[in-house]
Amino acid sequence: MAIKQLSETLINQIAAGEVIERPASAAKELIENALDAGATRIEIATAGGGKALLRVSDNGSGMEQADLELAVRRHCTSKISDTLEDIRTLGFRGEALPSIASVAKLSIASRRPDSDGGAEIAVAGGKVLHLRPAAANPGTIVEVRDLFFATPARLKFLKTEKAEAAAITEVVKRMAIAFPQVRFVLSGSDRSTLEFPATGEDHLARMAQVLGKEFKDNAIELDAAREDVSLTGYAGVPTFNRGNSAHQYAFVNGRPVQDKLILSAIRGAYAETIPSGRYPVAVLSITLDPAFVDVNVHPAKSDVRFRDPGLVRGLIVGAIREALAREGDRAATTGADGMLRAFSPGRSGFQPTWRPSTPTTSWTPEASPSRPYQPSTNGYGFGERPQGAFDGLAMPTARAETAAPIEPVRMEEPARFPLGAARAQLHENYIVAQTDDGLVIVDQHAAHERLVFEEMRKALHSKRLSSQVLLIPEIVDLPEEDCDRLMVFADGLGELGLAIERFGPGAIAVRETPAMLGEVDAQGLIRQLADEIAEWDTASGLAAKLEYVAATMACHGSVRSGRRLRPEEMNALLRQMESTPGSGQCNHGRPTYIELKLSDIERLFGRS
């Protein structure tokens, strides 16, 4: 078969298949052109999910008639010269407009601010219909109609109009976050108008426009650098999470990207702090020398390649973890909002009742020096109890229920501590503490699980945890392959205080358990570890997996739900939470406490 040269139209249509995958791809390219032109106002209009109409108007630098003629030719651009080593614009290939023009009906009207008149060009299916002077405002209006009319097969692969419109919305949101100094307006017959007013240099205000106003209250600022790479942005506290990764935004030198390395680094940074199936909210901006990153590896420019990917990943993981250690243990404000909605009198099915009954608290603290104890006179049992009132509580044996690593302390005044002073224990699982301006409800099991895990995590990087020798070794029968997997981790488990050895082909002998866990169900622990190890990728690092082992062991050794705690233990738990990074969520990512401000409580009773 003879080889022949493809026509220019067919070449453009093939290129369009890579660059313009759907209406959102066209919208992205046109918005990038507007931003490169220095626009401060960009308006996007759509119809039929962008398939029938996509119009992008801007107040940028505009083009002359001669520029329009070149703009619809492949590989014609004003953004680079002779090298790809120093790309500082969003577009640079000169492929977007000719690709769109080859598969749609394209018209461009433009005028430079210093010009007396404008010009217009129209192209359909790759053929120029006209190029002529035209009346136009300063800036550029690009209109795309009947996208893919020249390649009908591509239309079959598009999603519904609603889905395509949503994809365009997502593109606009990413661009809006990257350029807060630009006003964006998205409208059309297929959607309600969405507007993002310019916020100047206030990036957090723009993020709040896109991600919701609650993001400002649940975001931790990031500002870190390694060598010649800097990272800025905001990371949400772990308890402020979502059901998918759509709320993770990444930018490299101002370019919105959906790079796998960056998304993986975000996931790694939040390991053990977010439940399975939930995703953190984060906005990251990476700045580095353009020569150290290749933005030309994907037709849509959504992926990039770093010269030193390990450096970038380490920077992201380290910066987020440092931020979470600094202030990530605070509870998300959405927890309190959810509680308020649950208690709202207007909530369907909510029927407030008042019944004189014995309260469910297992302990109420002694009188403080400033408020002498007064016997209850209201008949409901709500009086303060004198010192020693909790002396008769039945406590489990010390070994079986040691609240290690908690050390008992005396109760302090609530104003002195962020998590306040313990006032009660509800249903033998929830600690109620009074703060200076509200109250905190703590899940004792989830909180202590996190504390034990952090102690074990420290041991992995410092010294071996102390263990307790079992008088009679615990023999756990397991399939031979599970025993093989466990023995690979034997040394690492020994560092955590769990000493195991092979006991025949199908059994494991447990000779020592971590002292800090007290009495442990060795059978259950070993079987769970065997199941988890079987799910792991054996090619990944052993050291990284030991943190998962520590998390599992911590869950088995923490204060259980249903155990009554003495007031000293409750306050000690609160104090240690305050000094432990990440204590705002358990190892599975669930919140360990919810804070309710006094103003919120007053709202429940109509007092404000």
Image (cartoon, helix red, strand yellow):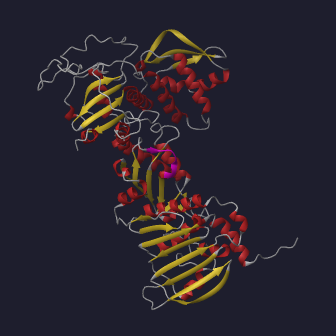
Q: Residue at position x 38%, y 43% from top?
A: 334
Q: Is residue 37 left or right of residue 149?
A: left
Q: Residue at position x 53%, y 87% from top?
A: 119
Q: Residue furthest top?
A: 471
Q: Could you say which quadrant of the image residue 534 lies in?
A: top right
Q: Looking at the picture, how far across and down is residue 347, in whole percent? A: 38, 39
Q: Is residue 605 left or right of residue 3?
A: left
The answer to whether 468 is drawn above or below residue 492 in the figure is above
Count of labels in the image: 0
Whether residue 86 is visible: no
Whether residue 567 is visible: yes
Q: Return the residue nearer the eye: 190 or 456.
A: 190
The answer to whether 87 is drawn above or below residue 128 in the figure is above
The answer to whether 478 is drawn above or below residue 243 in the figure is above
Q: Return the residue nearer the eye: 317 or 283.
A: 283
Q: Return the residue nearer the eye: 458 or 439.
A: 439
Q: Could you say which quadrant of the image residue 530 lies in?
A: top right
Q: Looking at the picture, how far across and down is residue 377, in whole percent? A: 17, 19
Q: Looking at the picture, how far across and down is residue 437, in whole percent? A: 22, 38
Q: Residue at position x 38%, y 27% from top?
A: 448
- Please state, as top left, top right, bottom left or bottom right, where the C terminus lies in the image: top left
Highlighted magenta segment, given as a residue range: 241-246
Q: Is residue 151 left or right of residue 485?
A: right
- Please state, as top left, top right, bottom left or bottom right, where the N terminus lies in the image: bottom right
Asked if the magenta segment contains residue 384, the reply would be no
Q: Is residue 145 left or right of residue 558?
A: right
Q: Residue furthest right?
A: 1
Q: Looking at the picture, how far across and down is residue 337, in whole percent? A: 36, 42
Q: Residue at position x 47%, y 59% from top?
A: 251
